[in-house]
């Protein structure tokens, strides 16, 4: 069996893993958000043999946004995913294509390829084992990261658990299912060897939001982080003395998430409905932004990395006044404005705050995963983590478990 790291190893973004065993298949094919001459993102490696199928862990662009390029190159194979992942993958690909048009750049694929991609999807629910091709069996288990996100459990020449993006503490999505064993594990290294205490991070985040600044901008993804931030504010309304304005896309995606009640926590259904109906969350009218800013408000809008969207427009209106605050709460890809701000390559007069919220597994979680499912694994690979985070995590886990735990890089191949 051969594993080829086409992207997302030793880096965060453009996740793509080629598996060659009984079948030849891809797990994910995303983009790495960057901003450069004529591009908005780095692609995974493109040279691979004929595929039998593709499987998708979840819909985020760093896992899916380059799938239409494969279609354009003539790859016409089944693409397996959960029903929510299918729907939101198409949305994310459309959004990625539109970003190129907004920046007056040539998109990496034709828009028609997105609709051809949609025809290739074969949806499967959680917990249903199915044969994907040539004797390869796949099961999707909840991963707790995004509506429909999955741990991909593979039975081929070896058993493989690709954990994708996984989170034990999400307010909306069910906890990851770990009642299985695997010989090979691909685990998430987003936080390296750090421990991310959820409650403390959320407490600090709310303190940040309510710190007395006149306007506060929280750039957030329209699906996932946007809902998480809104629900956190909803729980803490008594501490907030400003109007809250959110992007229309956050509410629209919340309604779409509610179409999949079997893929979210039962208790989350009520919270999300409360968010949709809440009079405390008003929709941003971009034509009236100057008026809203004059009064002072909290703004929640995409994109989370300040590379595009209404958040970038609001940022440009707030950045020069020291009474305003920008709160960045998640991963910021190299080359994006958010990353340049975080690394002080770009200076602003507004207060900049880095107040991360936990949406992936930390060191404690990864130890738990290994104890639960990978204690007898022959190989564990760290995925979805920048260096030196990935190597630090591999070293820490290797010390603890005395297993073959590696941090491969973009382009590496492992024969097993």
Image (cartoon, rainbow, N blue to C red):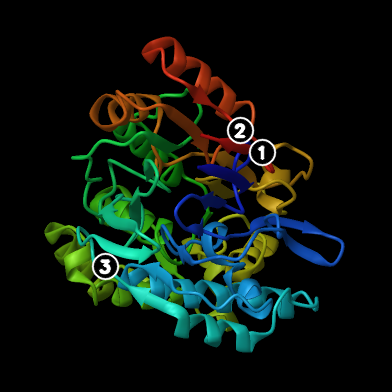
Mark-to-mark CA distance, 2 and 3:
41 Å
Q: Nearer the viewer, mark 2 or mark 3?
A: 2
Q: Residues within 10 Å of mark 1 (few under 14, many from 20)?
A: few
Mark 1 / mark 3, whichever is N-terminal: 3
Q: Residues within 10 Å of mark 2 (few under 14, many from 20)?
A: many
Q: Label 3: which residue?
A: 275
Q: Mark 2 and mark 1: span between their CA atoms?
A: 6 Å
| Among the 4 quarters of the image, the one containing residue 47 | bottom right
**Foreground mark, 1 or 3?**
1
In the figure, 157 relative to 106: above or below? above
Q: Position of residue 137 (x, y in %)?
A: 31, 57
Instruction: Name the residue: 66% across, 49% down.
Output: 338
Discs 2, 1 touching: Cβ within 8 Å: yes
Quarter location, residue 279: bottom left
- The residue tagged 1 is 412
Can residue 318 be seen in the rendering of this structure? yes
């Amino acid at each position: 069996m051969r594993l080829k790291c086409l992207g997302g190893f030793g880096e965060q973004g453009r996740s793509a893993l080629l598996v060659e065993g009984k079948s030849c298949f891809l797990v994910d094919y995303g983009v790495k958000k960057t901003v450069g001459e004529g591009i908005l993102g780095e692609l995974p490696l493109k040279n691979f043999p004929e595929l039998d199928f593709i499987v998708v862990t979840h819909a985020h662009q760093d896992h899916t946004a380059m799938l239409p390029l494969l279609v354009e190159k003539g790859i016409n194979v089944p693409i397996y995913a959960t029903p929510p992942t299918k729907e939101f993958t198409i949305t994310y690909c459309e959004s990625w294509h539109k970003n190129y048009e907004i920046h007056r750049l040539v998109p990496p694929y034709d828009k028609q390829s997105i609709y051809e991609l949609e025809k290739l999807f074969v949806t499967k629910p959680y917990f249903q084992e199915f044969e994907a091709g040539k004797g390869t069996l796949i099961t999707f288990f909840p991963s707790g990261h995004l509506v429909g996100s999955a741990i991909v459990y593979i039975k081929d020449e070896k058993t493989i658990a690709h954990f994708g993006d996984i989170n034990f503490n999400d307010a909306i999505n069910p906890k990851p299912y770990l009642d299985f064993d695997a010989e090979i594990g691909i685990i998430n290294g987003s936080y390296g060897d750090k421990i991310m205490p959820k409650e403390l991070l959320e407490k600090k985040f709310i303190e940040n939001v309510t710190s007395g600044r006149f306007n506060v901008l929280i750039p957030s993804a329209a699906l996932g982080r946007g809902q998480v931030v809104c629900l956190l504010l909803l729980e803490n309304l008594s501490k907030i003395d400003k109007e809250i304005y959110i992007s229309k896309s956050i509410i629209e995606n919340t309604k779409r998430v509610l179409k999949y009640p079997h893929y979210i926590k039962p208790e989350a259904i009520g919270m999300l409905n409360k968010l949709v109906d809440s009079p405390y969350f008003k929709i941003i009218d971009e034509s009236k932004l100057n008026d809203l800013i004059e009064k002072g408000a909290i703004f929640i809008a995409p994109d989370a990395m300040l590379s595009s969207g209404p958040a970038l427009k609001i940022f440009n209106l707030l950045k020069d006044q020291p009474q305003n605050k920008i709160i960045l709460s998640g991963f910021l890809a190299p080359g994006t404005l958010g990353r340049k701000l975080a690394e002080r390559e770009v200076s602003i007069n507004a207060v900049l705050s880095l107040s991360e919220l936990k949406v992936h597994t930390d060191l404690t979680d990864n130890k738990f995963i290994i104890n639960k499912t990978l204690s007898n694994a022959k190989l564990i690979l760290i995925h979805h983590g920048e260096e030196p985070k990935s190597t630090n995590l591999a070293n820490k886990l290797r010390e603890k478990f005395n297993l073959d735990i590696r941090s491969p890089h973009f382009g590496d191949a492992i024969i097993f």
